[in-house]
Amino acid sequence: MNWGMKIAIDARGAVWFRGTGIGTYTYQLAKGLATRANHEFLFFCPESAVTMMGEAPNVHRVAVPENPDWQVEQTHMMGAMLEAKIDLYHMPQNGLNLPQQVPFPVVVTLHDVIPYILPQTCNSTFLRRFLKQMPYIAKRADKLITVSHYSRKDILRHLEVPPEKIVVIYPAPEPIYVSLPQAPCREFLEECYGITGNPLILYVGGFSLRKNVGLLLRAFAASCKEVGSGAILVVAGRATPEVAGLLQLARALGIEKQLVFPGYVPVRDLPQFYCAADVFVYPSLYEGFGMPPLEAMACGTPTITSNAAALTEVVGEGAWQVEPYDEAGLTEAIVQVITDGKTAIRLAQKGREWVKRYSWKKAVTETMLVYEAVKRN
């Protein structure tokens, strides 16, 4: 067969970061590109998951042995790309560890520049690596894809990048996020996770300080006076050191028995969590995109977010937005969604309608156009 382009993708983030925005992005991008049968793809995968996303005649997978020295990994990957005579290399997870000498065009998806904006919320190792490498990555990349216009403005403000070099391509929720009947989802949470309580307020995401989960705990505690002592707040996400501080705050607020930490929830179970919830709340201080609110909206769950950073752009009219430091405003929003059925129905409908504008088919098509433009130049 006469192939079109030969494109290498560092797809390891699809496994490493599964369940996060970057993991969803990498997984769905690779999956969508694999359907472009007129092009040939080289996917770099972790050794433990080299068979990810099934088989396709136009996809070749290269297992990358993990090594503490990233230069050893990159030498291995570079050798495979040179042997395959690729036309282009795409790094979907911020381009970190891009080799100094790359003899073919490079596309990097730079999701955000949080280390420049909120460095105090970043892991120290990641922060040092990002700040050291990103100026070179931004300069070397032939095109930068980012995930919102807000993120694009931040990149232009913090990095020396010509505006024409940055393309905004929105990602989308995965197809598994659809409306499911609430009662069976509640039963699933009880049987599989031991979670009971009514009403159920849900948060899904990380526990970095920028996620602002402390504000959610305080607003939930205040809302219990109106929504009842049977209410529970489920905060799902991989346990990190910040969780200890949140548990301490919950004890101080007197809600420790109503706070549920299920830990990391596999992607396959997340639709049941969203559809079991009466309201989804995401009060983040900063997002370059913000995938969980869209997942909740796609599931028909009334959604409340902050109006910070890219969230206003991404959730639009589909979610109730509050100021990220307004505890009273967040409390009021939670109470009204829980106690007013008309508000909940209207918000759920708006969310379902708004999220229709996001599509992985469209995102993959727009990404292919970026590849074609880079190859022409």
Image (cartoon, rainbow, N blue to C red):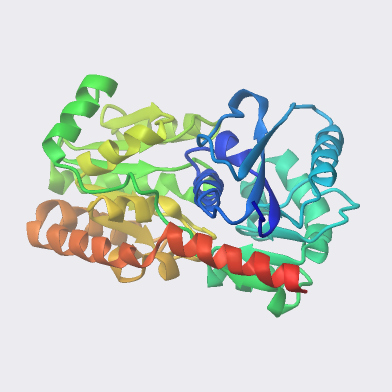
Query: For the point 69% across and 58% down, which residue is it?
Result: 5
Front-lying residue, 67 or 211: 67
183 to 320, vertically: above or below: above
Relative to 362, 338 lies left or right: left
Q: How many marks?
A: 0
The reply to whether residue 80 is in sight is: yes
Quadrant of the rendering where the C terminus is positioned: bottom right
Provide residue 94's location: percent of width, then percent of height: 68, 53
Front-lying residue, 287 or 349: 349
Relative to 198, 95 lies left or right: right
255 to 179, vertically: above or below: above
The reply to whether residue 169 is in sight is: no
As drawn, the residue found furthest toward the right would be 101
As drawn, the residue found furthest toward the front would be 1
Query: For the point 85% across and 48% down, which residue is it?
Result: 99
Relative to 217, 125 lies left or right: right
Provide residue 232's location: percent of width, then percent of height: 23, 35
Provide residue 137's location: percent of width, then percent of height: 79, 58
265 to 21, vertically: above or below: above
Relative to 99, 46 lies left or right: left
As drawn, the residue found furthest toward the left would be 341
Q: Where is residue 214, by image quadrant?
A: top left
244 to 77, vertically: above or below: above
Provide residue 132's location: percent of width, then percent of height: 83, 52
Query: For the point 83% across and 42% down, which residue is it?
Result: 83
